[in-house]
Amino acid sequence: MADFDFDLFVIGVGSGGVRAARMSAQYGARVASAEDKYMGGTCVNVGCIPKKLFVYASHYAEEYRHAEGFGWGQASPPFDWPVLLNNKNKEISRLNGIYQGMLDRAGVTHFDGRARIADAHHIAINGEVVSTDKILIATGGWPSIPDFPGKELVISSNEAFFLKSLPKRSLVVGGGYIAVEFAGIFKGMGVESHLSYRGPLFLRHFDDDVRAVVRDELHKKGVKLHFDSVVERIERASDDSLIVTFKDGEVIETDLVLYATGRKPAVDDLGLENVDVKCRANGAIIVDDEFRTSESNIFALGDVTDRIQLTPVAIAEAMAFSSTQFNGVRKLMDYDGIATAVFCQPNIGTVGLTESQAREVYAEVEIFKSTFRPMKHTLSGSDEQNMMKIIVDKKTDKVVGVHMVGSEAGEIIQGLAVACKAGATKAIFDATVAVHPTTAEEFVLMAEPVA
C-alpha cells in the first residue's frame, strides 16, 4: 500500500463521495477526491436543498390567502423571482464551502477537474497521473431526456434552478418526485402549470391511496394534469412560445418545458473501458454487498449504482464502505424500512410497504386509514385533505407500512420510521398517548381497520 500515492481515490464529491472520503481519512487512509462540476453534488446544488427552498417559496402565496381567515386581511405582495434566485445561490455557495471545509479538515487531497480511470490503480486528472490502492466511484446520476423532435427546446431540473426569469406558462413532463414537485412549485409561484405523464397515474412506486390523494389535491390547486399523455414533438413559434403536440393529438402552447423523466447513472467519460467494471444496461455499476465492483479494488456507491436514489442512502452506504475498508469493522447496508418524502403540495411521507406490496408478502393484512380536513383549514377556507394510512400484518400485529399526504408529512414520517424500524406493532401505536391537537395524533387514534 505504501507504493501508492493514495489508499483511496474518490471520484465525485456528492453526499456519498464526501462522506466516504472524509470518514476514510479519519480512519487513517490517505485519501484523494476529484470533482469537475460542483462541490456537494446533485443534492446540494441542483437537487434536495434548492428544491426544498423553492417549495418553501411557492407555499407563501397560498399562506397569504389562508391568513385572511385568521384575521390578517388581504396581504399578498408581488413575488420577486430574482430575490429568491440570488438568495438561493448564496446559500448553495455557503454549503459548497462547508463541504470543501469537511474535506480539508479531514486531510483529503482534493482535485478540481475531470478524473478518468487509466487502469485499476491509476487516475488521470488535470494532466497528471496518480496511483491509488482503491478507487471509489460516487458520480451520482444525471437527468435523462428521451429523443424526440424538439428535444433541444426543453430543459431538465438542472437548468430549472437557474432560470433568469419565471415563465408565464410551464409544462412538466414526468411522473416521479421531481416532476410532481416542480409542477407544484411553478403553480405556487404564479405560473400556469401543466403536468404530463405517460401512464394513468403518477408516482407509480407509491401507495395507490397516496397517488390518488395527491392527484386530487394538485387538481384542486389548479395544476392541469394530463395522464396517458406522450409528447410527440415540440416546436418554437414565431413569438418564442413552445407548441407541444402530443401523440393523441392534443396541443399545448407554453413558455417552458421541463423534462423530469428519470435520471441515469453518470458513468460517461470515466474511463470504465480501461477496467473490468461491469454495468447494467442503463449504465448502473454492479456492486456486491461491500460496494465492490467486478474489478476487485474498484468500488461504487450512491445513485451511480441505481439502487435507491436518495441522499441519506448514499451517506449510509458511504459509512458502511469506509468502516469496512478502513476501520476494520465490516458493516453492511440495510435497505429495509427506508423512509422518504416528496415535497409536492401537500407533502408525502412514507415508510415501509405499500398496500399492494403488503398483500403480496403477507397472508392477511389490516388497513387503517383516515382522510380529513386539517384543523388549520377550518378557518383558512381551504378544502385541502390529509390522508393517513397504516398497514399491519394481521398475524404478528406488526406495522409494515405507514403513509401520509399532508402538511409536514416528511417531518412526521421520520419519527414513525424509527418506530417501524424498531418493529412496533399496532398495539404499541394504540397504546401511545396522542399529542393534541396535532395532525400526527391521527396515527395513534385509528382504531378500526377499513379493510
Image: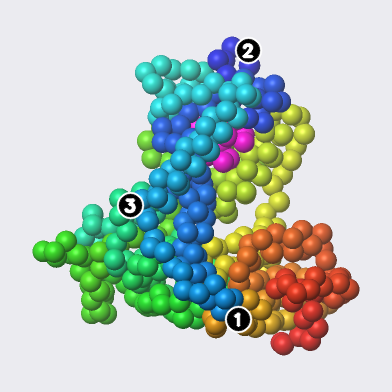
Which image quarter: residue 241? bottom left
Residue at the left extreme, as displayed: 238
Residue 80 x/y as whole percent: 37, 56
Residue located beneath label 1 in the image:
379
Which residue appears at 59% of the width and 12% of the height? 3
Highlighted range, magenta: 10-21
* Total numbered circles: 3
What amino acid type should be assigned to the residue bearing mark 2? Ala
User: Circle 1: is it few (<14), some (14-19), or many (20+) Cα within 10 Å?
Assistant: some
Q: Is residue 298 above or below residue 107?
A: below
What amino acid type should be assigned to the residue bearing mark 3? Leu
Residue 196 x/y as whole percent: 36, 72
Which secondary structure, mark 1?
helix
| 124 or 378: nearer the viewer | 378
What amino acid type should be assigned to the residue bearing mark 1? Leu
Is mark 3 in CB contact (under 8 Å) with mark 2? no
Which image quarter: residue 341? bottom right
Q: Does residue 147 appear in this view?
A: no
Residue located beneath label 2 in the image:
2
